[in-house]
Image (cartoon, helix red, strand yellow):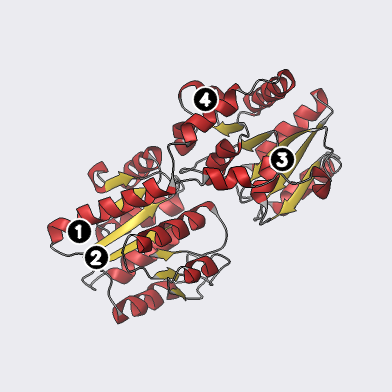
Amino acid sequence: MVITELDVGGAEKAFVKIAIGLKQMGWQVNAVSLRDAGLLTAELTSAGIPVEALNCGGFLDFRAIFRLRSHLKKSPPTVLLSFLHQANIAGRLAACGLSIPLVVSGVRVADIRPSVKWPERWTRCCVHKFIANSSHAAETHSRLCGIPMADFCAIPNGVDIQGIQQIQPIDRAEIGIDRGDVLFAFIGRLTTQKSPLAFLEAFLRMTREIPSCSAVLVGDGPMKQELNQFVEHHQLKSRVRMVGFRSDAIAILRAADALILPSVWEGMPNVVMEAMAAGVPVIASGVDGNRELLAGDLAKQTFAPNDPTALVELMKATVEAKLAGDATVQELQLSVVKEFTWDRCVSAYDRILRQWLAPLDVYPD
């Protein structure tokens, strides 16, 4: 199994869960990170999964292809399963000519950027199958890259509902938030994909109508300086806390009154599933995997990307529901997310990989 990096993120956490689950089901699993070892390495090694860090850089660091190829030649796998765009491209090119029976790319987001689209198109002949984490991600990737849907399988992520519900909410005072405020949370990388600026713009409008509200942004990324400048320019420092990466992100989430995720594109976002399991209302852009999680009666919790007016209206409705003691959204969310377990996810991976291997007359170790 190959991934771009093993720092903490939704795709990375899923990678670890699936790797450990497959090992427990009898697969011999080895993990490779194209970059450094990352914080999640310890969890893999504790489960008896060897991890090789290739210490490469970003997408244009072509050493990743050659270093991965050298690693694969030492012990060619039956299946090469990669996660994330850089690992997908490097994995395909490294595997060329090595007679690996099954090369599978993991599509974790419905990424529509040309910088993703064209490398995927140019290397699609080097991959046998695709596993996406949502039907929408599979359909988007298929359409953009000209790949037949027959080559795709959609397997949603899982979520540890019981574990999340056992985590105690953080004391808001620890992050400088008044206990009586309505608290909106953003949790994720501070990138244009996640649109944290749209969250702050909507929150600014909220403060003009509802004085007793606060916001917390958990995560780090290239937009950090721009977001800090927005907070300072609009004099929001008393209301907005940017706390960076936090290992206790779930505890902060459980202390919030709503999770806001205004992404431009998504796969099957772990943070939405975690909020649903935690009993925290989710307000999310109606894109890709968000629409699969917030479907039916929960579709009213979604809004069109880049529509701040619609986002503000949903935030106001959440405040009104809280004041009225209405927990309908939380109950609906929990009923949906109960269907998403890691056991089910790993079993689906095990089943589809064996199904794809069967006609090749090869079997996993």
Compared with residue 145, is residue 60 higher up or lower down, i.e. above or below? below
Please determine whether, in this image, residue 82 is positioned above or below residue 70.
above
Indicate the amino acid at tag 4.
Leu
Label 3 CA crowd tier, 10 Å (few <14, some 14–19, many 20+): many
Query: Which residue in the protein does label 1 denote?
Result: 357
Q: CA distance from mark 3 to mark 2?
A: 44 Å
| Residue 255 marker | 3
The three-letter amino acid code for the residue at tag 1 is Leu
Q: Nearer the viewer, residue 210 or 205?
A: 210
The image's mark for residue 298 is 4
Mark 2 sits on what residue? Answer: 364
User: How far is the residue under mark 1 from the one under mark 4?
Assistant: 38 Å
The answer to whether marks 2 and 1 mark residues whose Cβ atoms lie closer than 8 Å is yes
* Quarter-of-image position of residue 263: top right
Mark earlier in primary sequence (2, 1): 1
Query: Gap in Å between the C-alphas at discs 2 and 4?
Result: 41 Å
Instruction: Specify the quadrant that holds the N terminus.
Output: bottom left
